[in-house]
Amino acid sequence: MKPTARAKVVIRRCERYDVEAIRRIVREALEAFDLRPSGRTLIKPNVVASGPLFQHAHTRPEFIEGVVAGLRDRDAGMTELAVGERCGITIPTRTAFEGAEYYPMFKRARVKHYHFEEEPQVEIPLCHPKRLRDYLFTPEPVARADFFVNCPKFKSHPWTTVTFGVKNYIGIQDDRHRLIDHDHRLNDKLRDLQYVTQPQFLAIDGIIAGEGRMLTPIPFDLGLVICSNNQVALDSVCSRIIGLDPREIDHIRFAHEEGFGPIDLEAIDLGGDVTLAEAVARAKGFKVGLVRVEKYFEGTSISAYAGPPPGSERTDYCWGGCPGAIEEAIEILRLYDKEVDGKMPRMHVVFGAYRGPIDAKPGEKVVFIGDCAEWQGDLGGKLVSVENLYRDRSTKDPHTAKHDDIYAKMLAVTRKLAAARNKTHVRLEGCPVSVAEQVLALVSIGKTKNPYFAADQVIQFNKGYLMWRSATWAKRVAGKPYQHHGSFAARGAAAPELDPPTRG
Ligand code: SF4
């Protein structure tokens, strides 16, 4: 990859979500980087979850409004200015945009928007040596972007330690494609996604950052907006602000190793009205979220056991899949029911090829989660053998990947748990088993409130769901297919410029 001529990062003080202040910071950063947007300009926020209980999970609308205005101040022939996102798995982006109050902002800012799952999905070939697969799918507006603007939220992440610029790319794929390789090779997947497009400009919302988790983060008043002309450089500086070595964060190091940008401070020009040392002082005590599932549930009624994921790619833990998903799932339930830990019956959750004992007393359910769960032993006086159902990733073809409807998932999980009501154990299949499915499983076993039916969610969720399904149905009826096979030729100017040797 041909990286930006010289990576620059600007750290700016910004204590409030003041649109004009954000606009000024963005305009001045674009001036400092000598950047002017032109052609099809696309802003990618992070709107993984939203609504009253998820206030700190997403890039705030005032932030995007300021970015839009700052880009317009530097307009050099934008033919389109749009905001696009595919929010958290199973949630319609329409619901996430509504919960984050993006629609009034789109109107105020007169900016177009894309719900990525409703756009045609186009095929991008990959040819770098370390790729997980030879192609992947992305929504057409991403592939066509000439000037790509990445606007992540400054947050911790239970799978990948942090989520800044590189990690925000998980939202440039629709669910069925996003779930492929969203496992112990998640960091490799994030590396591969870098080949789809590269942002000419990034601005991260670190005004109120999110610590601890990604869907239900704890607000942290950081008071910073950080801009860059290079994705790896931005992630590198953000990592250092919270006291982490970016080389220790796999997805950032992988992107650096592929040539997407510098990781060392000597190779990055730092500017702004806050020094790195001052930013570090502001972030003192910021918690990251990388906690193994056994430790995470210590002291609760859930005992967790984790063995390694599949043997052919042996690592000691699946950081990108099912174990992290259950941590997010229980945190969601805690938001809806403060008593959930007290209500949850004693139960056991098992991941990967676990070889040790499971200390399940009579009546305590054991849930084996994920295709790679594997165990043999005694449960309730009977020998139980749980087989590894994992299918090698080479057998999963994104061309034929199917959409898993949330209501179908709800039905499947509910039926499965009902059928196992009087059994010692139950197996949840999938790779990964999503946060949504694990929420539903915990709700079913614990008889706690189902967040999907919560009063503040049900209308908004169903409205977004019905509009999404109607929009995709109408496109299908009009003869517009969901995805286009074959290398997509009309890529915009934001497509990475590859050096010939790296293509081999
Ligand atoms: S089934 Fe779950 S734990 Fe196993 S490899 Fe897949 S995502 Fe990881």
Image (cartoon, rainbow, N blue to C red):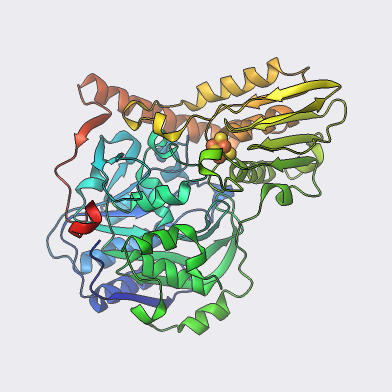
Query: Relative to 103, does residue 444 appear above or below in the rendering?
Result: above
Residue at (80% x, 36% y) in the render = 357
User: Residue 276 location, x and y as percent?
Assistant: 47, 81
Can residue 454 be seen by looking at this rendering? Answer: no
Residue at (73% x, 42% y) in the render = 304
User: Residue 423 location, x and y as percent?
Assistant: 77, 19
The quadrant holding residue 229 is bottom left
Can residue 216 be seen by looking at this rendering? Answer: yes
The quadrant holding residue 56 is bottom right
User: Residue 453 location, x and y as percent?
Assistant: 60, 30
Query: Relative to 355, does residue 17 appear above or below in the rendering?
Result: below
The quadrant holding residue 194 is bottom left
Query: Relative to 352, does residue 166 appear above or below in the rendering?
Result: below
Q: Left or right? Give the position of 231 relative to 40.
A: right
**Residue at the farthest left position:** 77
User: Residue 160 location, x and y as percent?
Assistant: 52, 54
| Number of marks in picture | 0
Residue at (28% x, 36% y) in the render = 119
In which of the image's four quarters is ligand 1 placed? top right
**Residue at the farthest top position:** 419
Query: Relative to 228, does residue 406 appear above or below in the rendering?
Result: above
Q: Left or right? Give the position of 234 relative to 431.
A: left
Q: Give whichever of 63, 315 is nearer the camera.
A: 315
